[in-house]
């Protein structure tokens, strides 16, 4: 549920709030610089105008004398122009001679720049027409000891300052509000997607391995993560199904020899037997136990190959020599089944690997080929160098082969094409070959031999 406190704890909301604060500070700094630059420009322009105005009055005084200056100040201080600018002319004795200021402002000396309080420029206000305001002034000492003051109201500067301050405050406020709203929306969006993941995870934990995380059309990082997790869940489901199948097959394959051992021993104990009969019963129990041991050893070898725990004893292995040695061992079995066994390994082909595991893999391929090839057929072992520097070992036979739709399935553990499981074997041969090939960076490829099956173990991408 998207509660308020939970929403405030979301990373999306916190990042939005942080970005809002940082953006507001940057905006305030930018507008503050604009404010300072604007005020500085206005003040500089005002000082330039005051200097030009006062210099013009000084020139009038120099050309026309005191009377000309007084007439000029009278015109510039006319009622229609009241408080447009401030003027004041004092005599050498300090007496007021002209201008619209009643007295010389306190604190302003001769020939200087300064600020003083003066009547407001908006003299038309009925409530308080004499409301004081600040003005910028320049004072000049004229010939004969006369003093001149020219001032300009700072009301415009204050208005600009207040306007910019209002803009800054409004912009910062709007930014914070929008960022908070965006943070709430982002937080709700993120929480809704997280809740969907949480619900799906709960259903998977409850045992429904077919459930998958929703993947949207935005193709963002959440969708990419969901797709990868779905792939992982599909692999887990596949492994769980395979594990259940392996468990069922293990139970089936191990139950028979265990039952035979128990029944044989129980029958042996029911009545007295001769030593030869006891010996025969024990030998049969040992053979059944050997079948169990072979099954467990095959499972252990597959597990070790898939886990890569036997990489420490790797060495350079000549696949051609290995194939010839194993073919020599299986030659008697091939002759017994009236099969021709051929080896094609004209030149040494070396790879780095574990010779014992490689020998097990090749032995399993030879054993399957001899077992399923009818009398009069042929089994061929071929070793050659790959086109890209790798190696390839192939075992071909002239037997019934494996249907294309079942070739991927038969490489799983305890999978056999005989549903009744009446033939000898435990269904681990090709699983071991696949695991050994994967341990050595290769792959097992099953294909038609025309007729029969061709099993290729490709190392190094061959």
Image: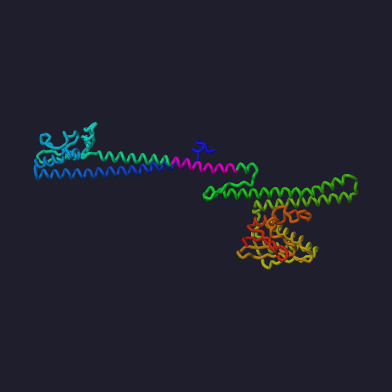
On the image, the x and y values in percent for residue 438 come to 65, 56
**415 relative to 112 in the view: left or right:** right
Residue at 17% x, 44% y is 53
Residue extending farthest to the top is 127
Q: Nearer the viewer, residue 392 or 70?
A: 70
Characterize the magenta stretch by its predominant secondary structure.
Answer: helix
Residue 431 spot, x, y in % from top left: 70, 55
Side of 116 where 421 appears, left or right: right
Residue 328, horizontal then vertical, whole percent: 75, 63
Is residue 211 a member of the stretch shown in magenta? Answer: no
Left or right side of 441 for 109:
left
Quarter of the picture containing the N terminus is: top right
Q: Is residue 112 visible?
A: no
Q: Quadrant of residue 46?
A: top left
Q: Which residues are magenta?
A: 179-200
Task: Based on the picture, tell me whether residue 184 belongs to the magenta stretch.
Answer: yes
Residue at horizontal 78 percent and vertical 55 percent from the top = 424
> Does residue 49 show up?
yes
């Amino acid at each position: 549920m998207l509660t308020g406190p939970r929403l405030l704890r979301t990373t999306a909301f916190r990042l939005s709030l942080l970005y809002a604060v940082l953006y507001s500070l940057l905006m305030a700094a930018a507008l503050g610089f604009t404010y300072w630059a604007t005020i500085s420009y206005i003040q500089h322009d005002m000082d330039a105008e005051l200097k030009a105005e006062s210099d013009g009055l000084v020139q009038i005084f120099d050309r026309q004398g005191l009377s000309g200056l007084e007439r000029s100040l009278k015109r510039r201080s006319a009622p229609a122009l009241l408080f447009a600018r401030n003027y004041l002319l004092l005599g050498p004795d300090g007496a007021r001679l002209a201008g619209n200021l009643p007295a010389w402002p306190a604190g302003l000396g001769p020939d200087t720049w300064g600020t003083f309080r003066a009547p407001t420029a908006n003299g038309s206000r009925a409530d308080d027409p004499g409301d004081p305001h600040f003005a910028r002034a320049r004072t000049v000492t004229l010939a004969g000891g006369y003093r001149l003051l020219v001032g300009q109201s700072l009301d415009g500067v204050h208005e600009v300052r207040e306007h910019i301050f209002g803009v800054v405050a409004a912009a910062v406020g709007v930014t914070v509000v929008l960022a908070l709203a965006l943070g709430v929306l982002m937080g709700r969006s993120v929480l809704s997607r997280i809740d969907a993941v949480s619900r799906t995870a709960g259903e998977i934990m409850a045992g429904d391995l077919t459930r998958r995380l929703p993947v949207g059309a935005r193709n963002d990082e959440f969708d990419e993560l969901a797709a990868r997790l779905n792939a992982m869940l599909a692999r887990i489901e596949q492994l769980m199904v395979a594990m259940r199948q392996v468990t069922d097959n293990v139970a089936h394959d191990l139950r028979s020899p265990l039952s035979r051992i128990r029944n044989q021993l129980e029958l042996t104990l029911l009545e007295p037997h001769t030593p030869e009969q006891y010996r025969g019963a024990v030998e049969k129990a040992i053979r059944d136990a050997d079948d169990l041991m072979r099954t467990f050893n095959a499972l252990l070898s597959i597990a070790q190959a898939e886990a890569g725990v036997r990489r420490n004893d790797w060495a350079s292995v000549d696949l051609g020599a290995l194939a010839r040695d194993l073919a020599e061992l299986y030659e008697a079995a091939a002759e017994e089944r009236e099969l021709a066994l051929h080896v094609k390994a004209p030149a040494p082909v070396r790879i780095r690997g574990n010779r014992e595991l490689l020998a097990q893999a090749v032995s399993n391929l030879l054993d399957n080929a001899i077992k399923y090839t009818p009398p009069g057929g042929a089994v061929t072992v071929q070793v050659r160098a790959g086109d890209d520097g790798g190696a390839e070992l192939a075992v071909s036979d002239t037997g019934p082969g494996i249907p294309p739709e079942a070739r991927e399935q038969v490489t799983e553990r305890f999978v056999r094409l005989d549903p009744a499981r009446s033939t000898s074997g435990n269904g681990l041969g090709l699983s071991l070959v696949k695991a050994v090939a994967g341990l050595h960076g290769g792959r097992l490829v099953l294909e038609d031999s025309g007729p029969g099956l061709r099993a290729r173990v490709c190392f190094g991408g061959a």
